[in-house]
Amino acid sequence: MPFYNDGTLIFCTSQRIVKRRFGTRGDTTSEIEFRPWKLAYADWKTKAIRFLETGLPDDTIHCNPMFHTENGMLHVSFIAGIPHDVAMHYLLYEMHGSSWNSLSKPKSISEEFTSMGFVSPRYICSGNAHSLHLIDKTNGKRFRVNTSFDAIFRVTYDPDRQTRILVTGIDEHDQHRTLIYDIVSNETLEIKGPAPVYKACLVGNRIAFAHRESGGIEDYQLCVAPLVLEATEKVITLEAL
């Protein structure tokens, strides 16, 4: 789930699989296998990779990272799922500092369950697979983001045009697709790629996206392809709240 801004790519990486038992109802438990994804960032030109420590528990799932600079301060937002007795508990977090090496401890944006979202200079977005909400930081207006996807898997934004959001979802044929929605023009376009465009970001006239390598547990690799935008029957709209 990459995100590119100003020459730097931030993404998630994992080299291990964890088995953990979670309680359900009564004495029933279920064992789940997952990758405890960690945050990393890289210079786009040199490809030098550095890991970004958050201080959260070892088996935390970090995902959906994004960043921007505002008034000389670096702001990093991400989703983190922390294991609890019953299930993973996901929240939207933010860190800030004068550089990558001086970021504050993660602070949750709210205590409401959030499995996807971001903080940009213009918006705060939060939600889950079936419900997304957007807050305009300039005026406090709130919106519901409606999509024609069966389920949503990621939402991010275009750092060069902050009124454009990218939404990855799954359609009625179980295919992953990524749409770009322009909040100003109300236009929705679809990103086309050489493979299903899963959790993509814009890199100038290219895209970076996660490509499934095998049927293994969350076996994804980053891929880069030309940016191709096409008309789509899928729809994204905003509903004022």
Image: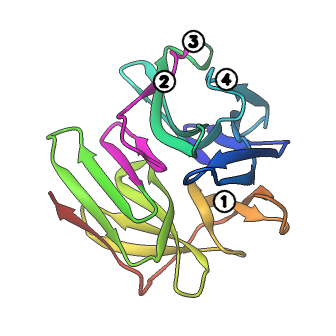
Q: Looking at the image, is 10 positioned above or below residue 198?
A: above
List the residue tagged with mark 3.
Answer: 102
Q: Which mark is residue 209?
A: 1
Quadrant in the picture for residue 220: bottom right
Q: Which mark is residue 190?
A: none
Disc nearer the start of the sequence (1/2) = 2
Measure the C-alpha gap from mark 4 to mark 3.
11 Å
Q: Amino acid at mark 1?
A: Phe
List the residue tagged with mark 2.
Answer: 95
Task: Decide which of 230, 166 is in the foreground and name it.
Answer: 166
The residue located at (46%, 39%) in the rendering is: 91
Q: Residues within 10 Å of mark 3 (few under 14, many from 20)?
A: few
Measure the C-alpha gap from mark 1 to mark 3.
28 Å
Disc nearer the start of the sequence (3/2) = 2
Q: Residues within 10 Å of mark 4 (few under 14, many from 20)?
A: some
Whether residues under marks 1 and 3 lie with C-beta atoms below 8 angstroms apart, the answer is no
Measure the C-alpha gap from mark 2 to mark 4.
11 Å
Q: Looking at the image, is 145 positioned above or below residue 116?
A: below
Q: Is residue 118 magenta?
A: yes
Disc nearer the start of the sequence (1/4) = 4
The residue located at (36%, 78%) in the rendering is: 235
Disc nearer the start of the sequence (2/4) = 4
Q: Which mark is residue 53?
A: 4
